[in-house]
Image: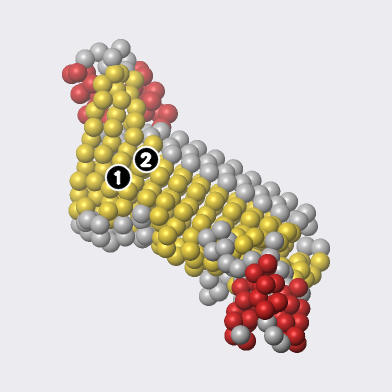
């Protein structure tokens, strides 16, 4: 049976701060932010049929449902063709058909809601409110910013932000890798996936990461207190630190400890490293600056604080600069 390709184009102006909703199954989704005011959706279908006419008839039953209003656009699969039920009905009709892929262009600051099943999703350049629900598929958020709310089951999530973000995430059986200049708010719950966070954490609000068996890797700057709740959790830090408490009530303190992070886990480990986004001075450079300092008492004071974990290398270099 030959295969025919059919394309559905949807174009609706929602405005820079409008709302776009998309819900599909078994189709790769690519969303790209634009500076315009319109939301453009292109859905591509692959239809197995005996003729062009039969393919056209099938296409009419498969077209996505469109609900457009002032400032909003909602695109969904038509009733009766969602998931397994729709696949069976199409097979019984003597043809095969599938939604092959969806490409979206929408205003960068729009309110974005995406719900997918068995689909990989990539969204680039959005900086407004974004809510993504994914079952059985990987999610990539590139050049992102703004408020992100992610629910993921059986899929990896990768976030690469170029602006401050607030991230709320619930994850089952998948790894999370999140990188941003600043996390204004961080709230992550993961069952069996590992969590990796790289970026500065705002001191204005507490942050929390919960896992059952997943590890938590935090790459950030100075001034963090991580309260660790976990009997079987190992703690590692590549940065100068203090470790307080014992058993299931421990605190890892870096610098002044101004940023508050809570890590709850049954068996996951914690590792703290320097952010790859801001390498900063090395301990060797601090040693060189200390050697160049002329006041022995001041050198001893700074070096002692660094060794005790009361300050990190950034703060040591700052103090050396102040006293130069």
Say if 87 sits above or below 148 in the image.
Answer: above
Pinpoint residue 80: horizontal percent, then vertical percent: 33, 32
Quadrant showing the N terminus: top left
Residue drawn at point x = 51 percent, y = 57 percent: 179
Residue drawn 28% across the image and 48% down it: 105
Q: Quadrant of residue 281?
A: bottom right
Give residue 78's position: percent from left, percent from top: 30, 36
Q: Nearer the viewer, residue 246 or 278?
A: 278
For label 2, the SS is strand
Q: Alpha carbon of mark 2 to alpha carbon of mark 1: how far?
A: 8 Å
Q: Which mark is residue 243?
A: none
**Horizontal side of residue 50 vs 187, given as left or right:** left
Quarter of the rendering occupied by the C terminus: bottom right
Q: Residues within 10 Å of mark 1 (few under 14, many from 20)?
A: many
Name the image quarter holding residue 302.
Answer: bottom right
The foreground one among 245 and 77 is 245
Q: Is residue 200 above or below residue 190?
A: below
Could you say which is closer to the camera, residue 199 or residue 239? 239
Q: Which residue is mark 1?
A: 104
Image-quadrant location for residue 293: bottom right
Provide the secondary structure element on which disc 1 rests. strand
Q: Residues within 10 Å of mark 2 (few under 14, many from 20)?
A: many
Residue highlighted by disc 2: 29
Q: CB under 8 Å between callouts 2 and 1? A: yes
Looking at the image, can residue 163 be seen? yes
């Amino acid at each position: 049976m030959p295969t025919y390709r059919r394309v559905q184009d949807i174009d609706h102006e929602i405005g820079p701060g409008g709302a776009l909703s998309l819900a599909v199954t078994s189709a790769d989704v690519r969303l790209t932010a634009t500076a315009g005011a319109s939301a453009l959706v292109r859905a591509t279908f692959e239809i197995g049929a005996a003729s062009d006419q039969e393919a056209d008839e099938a296409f009419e039953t498969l077209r996505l449902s469109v609900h457009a209003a002032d400032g909003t656009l909602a695109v969904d699969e038509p009733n009766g063709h969602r998931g397994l039920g729709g696949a069976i009905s199409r097979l019984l009709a003597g043809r095969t058909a599938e939604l092959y892929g969806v490409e979206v262009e929408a205003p960068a600051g729009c309110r974005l809601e995406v719900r997918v099943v068995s689909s990989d999703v990539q969204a680039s350049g959005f900086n407004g409110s974004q809510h993504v629900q994914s079952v059985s598929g990987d999610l990539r958020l590139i050049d992102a910013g703004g408020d992100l709310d992610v629910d993921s089951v059986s899929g990896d999530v990768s976030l690469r932000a170029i602006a401050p973000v607030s991230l709320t995430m619930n994850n089952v059986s998948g790894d999370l890798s999140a990188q941003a200049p600043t996390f204004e708010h961080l709230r992550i719950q993961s069952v069996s996936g590992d969590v990796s966070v790289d970026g500065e954490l705002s001191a204005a609000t507490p942050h929390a990461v919960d896992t059952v068996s997943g590890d938590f890797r935090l790459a950030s700057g100075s001034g963090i207190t991580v309260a660790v709740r976990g009997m079987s959790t190992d703690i590692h830090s590549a940065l100068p630190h203090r470790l307080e408490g014992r058993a299931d009530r421990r605190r890892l303190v870096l610098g002044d400890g101004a940023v508050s992070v809570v890590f709850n886990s049954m068996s996951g480990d914690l590792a703290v490293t320097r952010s790859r986004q801001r390498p900063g001075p090395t301990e060797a450079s601090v040693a060189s600056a200390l050697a160049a300092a002329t006041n022995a008492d001041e050198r001893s004071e700074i070096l002692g604080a660094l060794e005790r974990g009361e300050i990190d290398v950034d703060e040591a270099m700052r103090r050396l600069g102040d006293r130069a």
